[in-house]
Image (cartoon, rainbow, N blue to C red):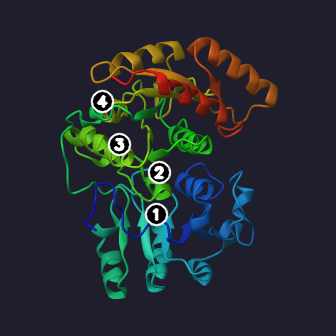
């Protein structure tokens, strides 16, 4: 079978990941490791973090099955992995120097290496030479596809397909998590649904997708369009993982590309109530939800009008009573249903999306 846009040979359903999270298993920067453990636990055979050797990953990542934590790659090879997944994407996008011996040990053990770094494994001379000698693959999840294309609006020719895009009031507010939870909720409700990964963690979970932020600017909408078309071949409801925020000056370009390329029929706004200022852009406050609802809906009309149907809220750190108050406030301000999809489940907001099936797709 010929390669298709979004293919990443070596991370399909049969992959057995040894997850390298040295020093980061209990840290927010271990996002890639946490994502795979939460949403693809059946593919994780063990986690490498000498800080927590002998414990279980479920002690650090809530709501995941027990996955053993080992102190070294050599110990992890005993679990029969097919690939070492670098479970973090450090600032600057380079491999942490302390991880290099572990990566070389995995190569020597005959397993592929999978990474979501901005700097590619395959461009590293030492690692490339070692991989060639051992006959293993270096798989860069962020490497853009060879085939690039401009958006043409072909998604508009799918009259029976609903496309939901997760958007945010800031970067890093749970857009991937919301998309995965909603795709699962729709399947549980009997709807055919597909998750479209547009970032490195989503790709590691889904086994396919494109890191949109590595695509040349002119082609970002076209690649997003192609991913939706691929997903729509097998699903009536396509849930696209959003990136950045239209209100975040550093990341708004990729947000707009996804808005126009995926041509959503529905929007899911993601919100972290603990944020008052933009992450990594502290000089700018997070806008009010009502303002963001209006902005996102206004921007979609240039391709296909879409409505914000619901708000996915991260109430982590709040007790049950505080969480309930926040959700009530969010619903009042945004004017649509809201819920914490991790804490309370995604059935309610999934049902909200299903109610839109009768709405016209223009």
Label 4 CA crowd tier, 10 Å (few <14, some 14–19, many 20+): many
Find residue 228 and name its label: 3
Image coordinates for residue 16, horizontal then vertical, percent:
54, 72
Q: Position of residue 261 (x, y in %)?
A: 29, 35
Look at discs 2 and 3 and give the one toward the viewer: 3
- Give residue 164's quadrant in the image: top left
Secondary structure type for disc 2: helix
Whichever of callouts 2 and 4 sits on the residue coming sooner in the sequence is 2
Residue 222 in view of the camera:
yes
Q: Which residue is mark 1?
A: 96
Residue 129 position within the rendered picture, expressed as x and y whole percent measured from the top left: 30, 81
Label 2–label 4 contact, CB within 8 A: no
The quarter of the rendered structure image containing the N terminus is bottom left
Q: Nearer the viewer, mark 2 or mark 1?
A: 2
- Quadrant in the rendering for residue 330: top right
Tell me the SS state at disc 3.
helix
State the residue position of label 2: 202
Q: Give the mark nearer the N terminus: 1 vs 4.
A: 1
């Amino acid at each position: 079978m010929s390669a298709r846009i979004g293919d990443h040979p070596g991370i399909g359903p049969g992959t057995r990941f040894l997850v390298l999270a040295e020093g980061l298993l209990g840290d927010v920067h271990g996002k890639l490791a946490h994502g795979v453990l939460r949403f693809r636990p059946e593919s994780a055979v063990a986690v490498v973090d000498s800080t927590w050797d002998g414990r279980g990953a479920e002690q650090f990542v809530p709501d995941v099955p027990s996955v053993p934590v080992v102190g070294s790659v050599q110990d992890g090879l005993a679990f029969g992995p097919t690939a070492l997944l670098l479970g973090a994407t450090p600032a600057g996008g380079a491999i942490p120097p302390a991880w290099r011996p572990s990566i070389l040990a995995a190569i020597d053990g005959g397993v592929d290496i999978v990474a979501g770094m901005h700097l590619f494994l395959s461009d590293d001379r030492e690692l490339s030479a070692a991989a060639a000698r051992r006959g293993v693959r270096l798989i860069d999840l962020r490497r853009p596809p060879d085939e690039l294309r401009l958006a043409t609006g072909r998604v508009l020719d799918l009259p029976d397909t609903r496309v939901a895009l997760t958007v945010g009031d800031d970067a890093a507010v749970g857009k991937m998590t919301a998309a995965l939870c909603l795709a699962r909720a729709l399947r549980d409700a009997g709807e055919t649904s597909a998750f479209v990964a547009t970032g490195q963690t989503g790709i590691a979970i889904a086994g396919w997708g494109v890191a949109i932020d590595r695509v040349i600017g002119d082609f970002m909408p076209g690649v997003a369009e192609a991913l939706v078309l691929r997903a729509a071949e097998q699903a009536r409801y396509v849930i696209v993982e959003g990136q950045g925020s239209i209100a975040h000056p550093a990341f708004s370009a990729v947000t707009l590309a996804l808005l126009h390329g995926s041509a959503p029929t529905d929007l899911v706004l993601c919100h972290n109530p603990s944020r008052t200022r933009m992450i990594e852009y502290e000089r700018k406050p997070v806008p009010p939800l009502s303002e963001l609802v209006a902005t996102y809906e206004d921007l979609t009309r240039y391709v296909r009008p879409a409505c914000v149907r619901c708000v996915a809220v991260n109430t982590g750190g709040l007790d049950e009573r505080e969480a309930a108050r926040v959700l009530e406030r969010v619903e009042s301000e945004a004017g649509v249903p809201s819920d914490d999809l991790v804490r309370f489940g995604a059935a309610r907001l999934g049902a909200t999306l299903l109610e839109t099936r009768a709405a016209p797709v223009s």
